[in-house]
């Protein structure tokens, strides 16, 4: 994306995404749950004092019951995922009810490590092949907390309206990026809140958080870390030659074969700074290849990106530029599902006027909110 005289969007948001990590407060009874090829995984966070407690598990009567060496808050509720129908926690006993036709499950405890608490992991195979996989050997899947009859943590997302204040972003005869991103973000927030989702905004007005970019990014980071975060979505407007148009969504990883590395350099700040940050980000991507937990989180980012891209294209009929991956420094730390979406080209003679339209921005916001709700398994 071309920028006037200010650093790139992505470099300006580095600290926000780098610190968009899941925080781990006191253990909650409700599990995080997600579906993977061949199995459903439930993850229960254990108290900070529990390093790796012993467990005693038994599968019988269409359920798995796990006796822990530590206690959790009592709670119960339904589960909407393949192979499971409900869970109940009572002190040191965790029970998961299996769906009809599912008579096996495996449990294990992952010790506290890397800033994460110890976790009870329960895998419920949903295919014959998955039955042979040892518990916790498959990639961890933990996307969102299910509905519960007790009070549970509300899902929380961070919406980052690109640019603002002294950094207007792309400017064309039709739109200024900072205006479009803020309007779309505010509209998205309203829809998410209507469905019970907590939303953290990196900005709610046309402002920067500090004239010092490092301090500005640190302030954004603190907001993003204001509790457990389920997703980080950075909203931007693209710019190129007058023929370029369409919507594209990015998640972090090694660039696709044949990708134009100059795009990552440009979006990481341009010039020597962009080269430096791109090298660092690419090195991070390479190191993550052997990290199972990181790969699972990158997988969630890909899922979120695919949902967002699909919803936006269906709602707007825009040119589909697809879901892509590259070494964008802004989303290089995959501790929570994080994506960057370009909602269109403000430089295009058709898309520019559309992005200036309140009705079109509402379309974008509704589609973006629906994709996030889909990702969170929230109606």
Image: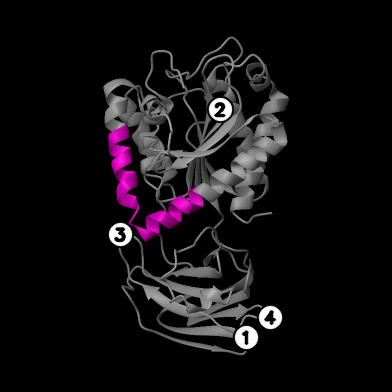
Give the residue at x 47% y 42%.
251
Check disc 4 and report the residue beneath it: 100
- Residue 240 appears in view: yes
Contact (Cβ within 8 Å) of mark 4 with mark 1? yes
Check disc 2 and report the residue beneath it: 181
Helix, strand or loop for disc 1: loop
Note whether 233 is above or below 51 in the view shown: above
Tell me which corner region of the image, top left, top right, bottom left or bottom right, holds residue 167. top left
Which of pointers 3 and 4 lies earlier in the amino acid sequence? Answer: 4
The percent coordinates of residue 351 (x first, y second) are 65, 20
Contact (Cβ within 8 Å) of mark 3 with mark 4? no
Mark 2 or 1: in front is 1
Note whether 240 is above or below 53 in the view shown: above
Check disc 3 and report the residue beneath it: 114
Closer to the camera, 76 or 370? Answer: 370
Closer to the camera, 33 or 275? Answer: 275
Closer to the camera, 109 or 261? Answer: 261
Helix, strand or loop for disc 2: helix
Which of pointers 2 and 1 lies earlier in the amino acid sequence? Answer: 1
In whole angstroms, how far apart are the C-alphas of marks 2 and 1? 49 Å
């Amino acid at each position: 994306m071309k920028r006037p005289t200010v650093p790139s969007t992505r470099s300006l948001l580095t600290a926000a995404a780098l610190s968009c990590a899941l925080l781990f407060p006191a253990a909650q009874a409700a599990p995080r749950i997600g579906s993977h090829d061949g199995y459903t995984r439930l993850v229960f966070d254990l108290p900070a004092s529990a390093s790796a407690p012993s467990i005693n598990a038994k599968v019988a009567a269409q359920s798995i019951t796990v006796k822990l060496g530590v206690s959790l808050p009592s709670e119960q509720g339904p589960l909407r995922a393949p192979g499971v129908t409900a869970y109940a926690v009572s002190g040191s006993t965790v029970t998961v009810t299996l769906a009809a036709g599912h008579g096996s499950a495996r449990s294990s405890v992952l010790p506290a490590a890397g800033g994460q608490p110890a976790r009870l992991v329960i895998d419920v195979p949903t295919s014959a092949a998955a039955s042979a996989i040892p518990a916790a050997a498959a990639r961890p899947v933990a996307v969102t907390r299910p509905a519960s009859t007790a009070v549970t943590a509300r899902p929380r997302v961070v919406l980052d309206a690109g640019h603002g204040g002294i950094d207007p972003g792309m400017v064309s005869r039709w739109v200024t990026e900072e205006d479009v991103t803020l309007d779309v973000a505010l509209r998205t927030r309203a829809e998410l809140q209507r469905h019970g989702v907590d939303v953290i905004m990196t900005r709610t007005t046309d402002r920067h958080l500090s004239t010092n970019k490092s301090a500005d990014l640190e302030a954004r980071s603190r907001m993003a870390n204001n509790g457990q975060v389920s997703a980080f979505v950075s909203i931007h407007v693209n710019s190129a030659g007058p023929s370029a148009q369409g919507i594209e969504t990015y998640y972090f990883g090694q660039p696709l074969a044949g990708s134009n590395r100059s795009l990552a350099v440009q979006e990481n700040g341009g010039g020597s700074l962009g080269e430096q940050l791109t090298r660092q980000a690419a090195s991070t991507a390479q190191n993550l290849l052997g990290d199972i937990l990181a790969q699972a989180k990158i997988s969630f980012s890909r899922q979120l990106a695919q949902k967002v891209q699909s919803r936006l294209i269906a709602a707007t009929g825009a040119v589909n530029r697809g879901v892509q991956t590259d070494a964008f420094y802004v989303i290089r730390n995959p501790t929570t599902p994080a994506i960057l979406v370009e909602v269109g080209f403000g430089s295009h003679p058709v898309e520019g006027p559309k992005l200036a339209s309140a009705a079109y921005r509402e379309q974008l916001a509704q589609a973006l909110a629906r994709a996030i709700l889909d990702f969170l398994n929230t109606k």
